[in-house]
Image (spheres, rainbow, N blue to C red):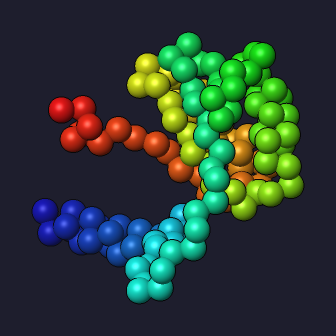
Amino acid sequence: MTSLIDVVLLLVIFFMLATTFVKEGRLRVELPEANSAPADAPLDPLVITITAQGGYRVNERTLVNNSRETLRATLQKVAGSDTSRPVTIRADARSTHQSVVTAMDVAARLGFTQVNIATISQQAEE
């Protein structure tokens, strides 16, 4: 029994020394900080609305079809070269997750950095 304990102890020590500890890639999150300076005048946001059927509307204008190319062309037409404008994504609760991810991906590929997801507060429902 003593030799079995010695063998197990040696195996534990061997695996502890032979294991490499790799630092996995981490997502860096920069949290906002509050300051006392008055906020700048908000820019007019682009609003992408996703219907329950997966259709897209940009600033309440319904798109011809639901393809990502049409959404990309419409965002380029509405925003022009101003990618500093915030983009707000409003999705129906019954819309697919893929539709929301597609809208976020198109906005990110066009260079928009301020993407917001609109939600309904609990107080508004009551």
**Residue drawn at (85%, 34%), measured in percent from left and top?**
73
Query: Does any portion of residue 18 appear in the rendered image?
Result: no
Q: Name the one closer to the observer, 66 or 24.
A: 66
**Residue drawn at (18%, 32%), measured in percent from left and top?**
126
Residue 99: give x, y in percent of width and height: 60, 27
Side of 96 relative to 10 (left or right) = right
Residue 82: give x, y in percent of width and height: 80, 57
Side of 11 relative to 104 (left or right) = left
Residue 116: give x, y in percent of width and height: 53, 50
**Residue drawn at (62%, 50%), measured in percent from left and top?**
45
Q: Residue furthest left?
A: 1
Q: Quadrant of residue 10?
A: bottom left
Q: Name the one closer to the observer, 13 or 121.
A: 121
Q: Name the one closer to the observer, 56 or 38.
A: 38
Query: Does any portion of residue 47 appear in the rendered image?
Result: yes
Side of 52 relative to 68 (left or right) = left
Looking at the image, is 57 positioned above or below residue 78?
Answer: above
Side of 50 relative to 78 (left or right) = left
Looking at the image, is 126 positioned above or below residue 10?
Answer: above
Q: Residue furthest top?
A: 53
Point out the image quarter for the N terminus. Answer: bottom left
Residue 3: give x, y in percent of width and height: 21, 68
**Residue drawn at (51%, 35%), measured in percent from left and top?**
90
